[in-house]
Image: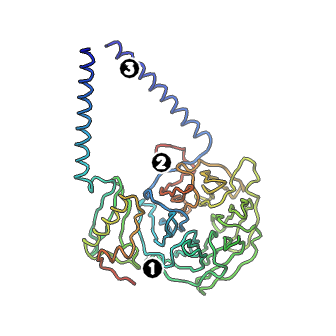
């Protein structure tokens, strides 16, 4: 009889530890959700303009030198513009949506570009 | 207690040994059958698309338009073979579409025709993409009937679009002259009507095969000489009973003077790959595409490297991008 109690005791201990461990892991994930996701964003300056690169598991996946969807070789004029659209691409990728940027996305985010 | 531990350790050892043996046997079997290895490259994510159109200029693959099961697209992307990365470029200026055609004349890409299911319309508009300026210019509409599921290829001077489906299957061919901005019909293709066939280009020869018409997979095989603009019929692709080259909605590409037909549809989606050697006019089966079997994929090919991406299997739309090494040994660890 005593044996059963000790088995139950050990089992409960393992259960508690597992739950505690999972809880810690989850809260950690949540607090760093944007940084620890599969995808990460890097904004780089390039001759008075800005480029964004998106990495998937530390491997370059997208290198965006021109404003996506816009006609011609237009580049991002500010770091903020590149960052806004880069973050939008990352959020689409994280939601498993095809990471297409439309002209409406550019307009809605007040991106400085020539809509020819 | 100690004895139990020893027993368990020995069991584990046995199991590991058996697994290792089994794994090795498996590896040997694979390499005995066929040559070629597929390696996974930079990949899109789950919500992907099929029936996109693609062309390659130097080491850059260009891909645009397509259908994801709900929506038609008009976005346009480049894939850099050297850096293994993508970039979204200027939108394709025509309406969203699937099953468009594209070809390259010199260093400029052309894309047009296709189908939009929202309006249930076959399309004939055509556009030129300038890689130096990232801009599109509308050119003369395709002069044949509006259609989709064509084959298309280019030379240094002209573009060619033919076969396809405009409500019924077609066999006519049209030539685009970029200097005059005109389309003229060219004659001499003696093959069957078809849609969703493929071509691959080796030097100045364009090889045409596969496709489907009225539920029948076409088995005739043709070569078009870009210099003389003459068609010649070759041995049917089902001549050898062991080969199953016939299919529709496949992709084709060229690596180091050999042509390849991969994936596609034959009853259902398939993953088989065949290599064509022009000097011996013979087909050899290669290592099958190592991820989901698929139809309506795209291929990037610059003559020495080739990539197969996107496509669908039934209603599952696919996102991956695989490079093919026809002479490497098959390896499961790089998928």
Label 2 residue SS:
loop
Label 1 residue SS:
strand
Mark 2 and mark 1: Cα distance apart in space: 35 Å
Question: As displayed, is residue A55 above or below residue A17?
Answer: below
Q: Residues within 10 Å of mark 2 (few under 14, many from 20)?
A: some
Same chain for the residues under marks 2 and 1 in the image? yes
Q: Residue at x 51, y 59 (%)?
A: B310
Locate residue A116 relative to residue B156 in the image: left or right.
left
Labels 2 and 1: the sequence-earlier one: 1
Label 3 residue SS:
helix
Labels 2 and 3: the sequence-earlier one: 3
x, y percentage for residue A21?
24, 38
Snapshot quadrant of residue B111 = bottom right
Question: As displayed, is residue A92 above or below residue B11?
Answer: below
Q: Which mark is residue B9?
A: 3
Residue at mark 1: chain: B
Residue B103 visible to an observer of this rendering: no
Residue position for label 2: B335
Residue position for label 1: B135
Residue at mark 3: chain: B
x, y percentage for residue B98?
55, 69
Mark 1 and mark 3: Cα distance apart in space: 67 Å
Snapshot quadrant of residue B102 = bottom right
Q: Residue at x 77, y 53 (%)?
A: B239
Quadrant location, the N terminus of chain A: top left
């Amino acid at each position: 009889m005593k044996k059963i109690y000790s088995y139950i005791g050990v089992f409960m201990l393992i259960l508690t530890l597992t739950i505690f461990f999972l809880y810690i892991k989850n809260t950690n994930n949540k607090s760093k959700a944007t940084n620890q996701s599969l995808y990460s964003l890097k904004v780089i300056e390039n001759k008075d303009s800005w480029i964004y690169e998106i990495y998937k598991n530390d491997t370059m996946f997208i290198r965006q030198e021109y404003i996506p969807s816009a006609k011609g070789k237009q580049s991002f004029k500010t770091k903020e513009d590149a960052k806004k659209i880069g973050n939008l691409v990352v959020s689409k990728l994280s939601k498993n949506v095809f990471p297409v940027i439309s002209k409406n996305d550019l307009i809605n985010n007040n991106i400085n570009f020539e809509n020819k | 207690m100690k004895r139990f531990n020893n027993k368990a350790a020995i069991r584990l050892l046995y199991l590991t040994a058996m697994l290792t043996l089994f794994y090795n046997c498996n590896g040997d079997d694979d390499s005995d059958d066929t040559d070629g290895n597929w390696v996974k490259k930079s990949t899109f994510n789950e919500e992907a698309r099929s029936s996109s159109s693609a062309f390659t200029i130097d080491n850059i693959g260009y891909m645009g338009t397509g259908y994801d099961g709900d929506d038609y697209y008009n976005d346009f992307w480049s894939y850099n073979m050297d850096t293994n990365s993508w970039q979204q470029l200027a939108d394709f200026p025509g309406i969203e579409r699937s099953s468009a055609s594209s070809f390259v004349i010199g260093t400029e890409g052309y894309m047009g025709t296709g189908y939009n299911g929202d309006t249930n319309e076959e399309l004939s508009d055509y556009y030129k993409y300038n890689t130096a300026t990232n801009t599109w210019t509308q050119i003369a509409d395709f002069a044949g009937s509006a259609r989709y599921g064509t084959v298309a290829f280019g030379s240094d001077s002209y573009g060619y679009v033919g076969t396809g489906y405009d409500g019924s299957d077609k066999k006519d061919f049209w030539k685009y002259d970029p200097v005059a901005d005109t389309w003229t019909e060219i004659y001499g293709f003696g093959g069957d009507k078809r849609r969703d066939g493929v071509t691959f280009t080796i030097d100045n020869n364009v090889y045409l095969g596969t496709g489907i018409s009225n539920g029948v997979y076409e088995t005739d095989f043709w070569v078009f000489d870009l210099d003389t603009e003459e068609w010649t019929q070759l041995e049917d692709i089902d001549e050898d009973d062991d080969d199953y080259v016939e299919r529709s909605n496949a992709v084709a590409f060229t690596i180091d003077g050999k042509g390849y037909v991969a994936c596609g549809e034959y009853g259902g989606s398939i993953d088989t790959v065949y290599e064509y050697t022009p000097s011996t006019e013979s087909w050899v089966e290669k290592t099958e595409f190592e991820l989901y079997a698929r139809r309506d994929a795209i291929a990037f090919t610059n003559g020495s490297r080739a990539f197969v991406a996107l496509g669908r299997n039934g209603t599952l739309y696919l996102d991956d991008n695989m490079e093919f090494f026809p002479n490497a040994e098959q390896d499961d660890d790089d998928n």
